[in-house]
């Protein structure tokens, strides 16, 4: 592992903490015709992150870059910014094993000047679903990702479907602001019982871990009822959730795949957020409403 040097070595993990070193490396790679696939993360890595890296590694003629940065701008007051799990050494080892070649690990002062004031506005979707419960969250996400895009200058950027609203908003940002990278979504990686992998699962006690499976179970029940229409989807999901009253649901929402109003038939997305003890978890699933296409 090569730490904090500006010289880039292929097939080896290069860890850079300064934005200007990353941009210089990226420009050099572009000059020799390499493509750059970028996997932004907040660290505390698990198989979900590594699946995204594996997807990136399959893009031909591509150097894979990742970032590890717990972004204060996307956490609201009283949220878990301070407590968010940090495991830098284990993360770097996992990225090295997965074949990542460049990791950007800035500290907060590297990314944000103390008087930074300009942010990316996510539009109306930023105030719905997650945005209604986490005011300012998506402005924080889009702002940091826009900055990371400008620093890393990727051709491709890969994000998990687990954070589905984030993925939709990032695709829109890239389209609406004419950003270069193609934004690629990667399906959610789950535990054997269906629980979506998440860094925040580490907060759960054994008992809460058992209870948390109700999120994915409700999505599965809703998806199975899709053929009978939108009301049946809600009914099946709510019935499953009712069996686990300790889990407090923030929202259960059926939408179209772009997160507009739910269709009467065709492809749709069912999204859920719930609190298990003090831990807030989200999940979602694709489904078809009405007759299968
Ligand atoms: N289970 C998963 N399957 C696929 N991608 C995932 C999964 N969990 C997270 N990701 C993706 O990994 C990227 C980095 O996410 P992040 O570092 O916030 O991890 P996280 O597990 O989502 O953490 P948390 O849920 O605590 O916010 C995002 O694009 C996110 O959607
Ligand atoms: C995209 C992201 C890295 C921006 O901080 C974060 O929201 C995440 O890990 O999903
Ligand atoms: N994975 C989404 C980042 C967040 O919850 O802040």
Image (cartoon, rainbow, N blue to C red):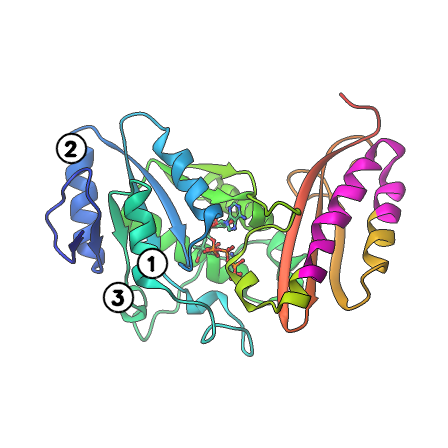
Q: For label 2, count other residues whose C-alpha is less than 10 Å away and answer few (under 14), some (14-19) or many (20+).
A: few
Q: Position of residue 29 (x, y in %)?
A: 18, 36
SS for tag 2?
Answer: helix
Give the answer, above or below, for where 6 lies relative to 185. below
Find the residue positioned furthest to the front.
Answer: 206
- Left or right, 250 with reference to 163: right
Name the residue located 18 percent from the left edge and 55 percent from the top edge.
20
Look at the image and say whether residue 217 sits in the magenta stretch.
Answer: yes
Find the residue positioned furthest to the left.
Answer: 7
Q: Which residue is mark 1?
A: 90
Q: Quadrant of the C terminus?
A: top right
> Rounded to the nearest whole Å, what is the CA distance between mark 2 and mark 3?
26 Å
Task: Report the mark closest to the observer, 1 or 3.
Answer: 1
**Quadrant housing residue 68:** bottom left
Q: Which residue is mark 2?
A: 31
Label for residue 110? 3
Q: For label 3, count other residues whose C-alpha is less than 10 Å away and answer few (under 14), some (14-19) or many (20+).
A: few
């Amino acid at each position: 592992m090569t730490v904090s040097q500006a010289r880039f070595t292929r097939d080896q993990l290069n860890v850079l903490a300064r934005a200007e070193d990353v941009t210089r490396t990226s420009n050099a790679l572009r000059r020799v015709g390499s493509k750059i696939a970028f996997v932004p993360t907040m660290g505390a890595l698990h198989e979900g992150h590594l699946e995204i890296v594996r997807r990136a590694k399959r893009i031909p003629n591509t150097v894979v870059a990742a970032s590890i940065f717990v972004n204060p701008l996307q956490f609201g007051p009283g949220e878990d910014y301070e407590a968010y799990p940090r495991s830098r050494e284990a993360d770097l080892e996992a990225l090295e094993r997965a074949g990542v070649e460049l990791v950007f690990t800035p500290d907060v002062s590297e990314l944000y000047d103390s008087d930074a004031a300009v942010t990316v506005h996510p539009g109306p979707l930023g105030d719905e679903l997650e945005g209604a419960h986490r005011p300012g969250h998506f402005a924080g996400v889009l702002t940091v990702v826009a900055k990371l895009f400008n620093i890393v200058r990727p051709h491709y950027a890969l994000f998990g479907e687990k954070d589905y609203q984030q993925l939709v908003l990032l695709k829109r940002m890239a389209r609406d602001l004419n950003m270069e990278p193609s934004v690629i979504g990667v399906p959610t990686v789950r535990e054997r019982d269906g629980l979506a992998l998440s860094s925040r699962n580490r907060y759960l006690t054994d008992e809460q871990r058992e209870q948390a499976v109700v999120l994915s179970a409700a999505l599965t029940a809703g998806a199975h009822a899709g053929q009978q229409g939108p009301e049946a989807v809600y009914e099946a999901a709510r019935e499953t959730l009712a069996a686990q009253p300790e889990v407090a649901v923030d929202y259960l929402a059926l939408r179209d795949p772009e997160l507009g109003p739910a269709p009467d038939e065709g492809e749709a997305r069912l999204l859920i957020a719930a609190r298990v003890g003090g831990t807030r978890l989200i999940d979602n699933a694709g489904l078809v409403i009405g007759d299968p296409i």
